[in-house]
Image (cartoon, rainbow, N blue to C red):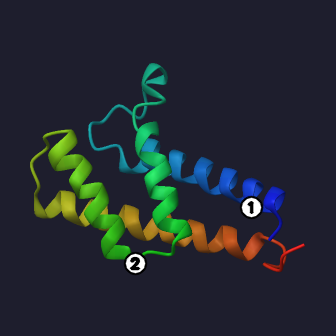
Amino acid sequence: MSDSGFKTFYAKVHERADEILQYLWDPIGVGHFPEARDEYSSYVPQVVRLLLEEKNHPELVRYLHEIEAVHMGLSQTEASLAHTQKIAETLVAHYRWLRTREPSQSTD
């Protein structure tokens, strides 16, 4: 993939991950407030990195749970773990779908 192709792909993955974190993950329930649109933006680059490195599902779950527990001070419950697992699955599924939409991985 060319450098410009990678930048375009990265931008698509970044945008999709940002939307998933904001509107689906949303552990503190602010996704519907326009003024909180960037609430989870600082976590997106690491999520994208994990996706681009094709890290496995448990690594994404671990990262998101760390944010919830350590950075946000949220209690960890079976329900929150199930939700976080679903979000990790969603992130991976969207990443894989975006990969199939990209032109050949060959370099220029």
* Mark 1 crowd level (few <14, some 14–19, many ≥20, 10 Å Cα): few
Give the side of residue 55 with respect to residue 26, left or right: right
Q: CA distance from mark 2 to mark 1?
A: 21 Å
* The label number, if any, that marks residue 6 in the structure image: 1
Q: Quadrant of residue 79?
A: bottom left
Q: What residue appears at the point 26 percent right and 65 percent down from the top-left corner?
A: 62
Q: Residue at x 42, y 71 (%)?
A: 89
Reading the image, the residue beneath label 2 is: 56
Residue type at tag 2: Asn
Say which quarter of the image contains residue 80.
bottom left
Task: Answer left or right for 2 relative to 74.
Answer: right
Viewer-nearest residue: 60 or 1: 1
* Residue 15 image offset from top left, x and y in percent: 61, 47
Determine the secondary structure under disc 2.
Answer: loop
Which residue is at 36% across, 66% downward?
Answer: 60
21 w.r.t. 94: above or below: above
- In percent of the image, x 78 and y 70: which residue is there? 102
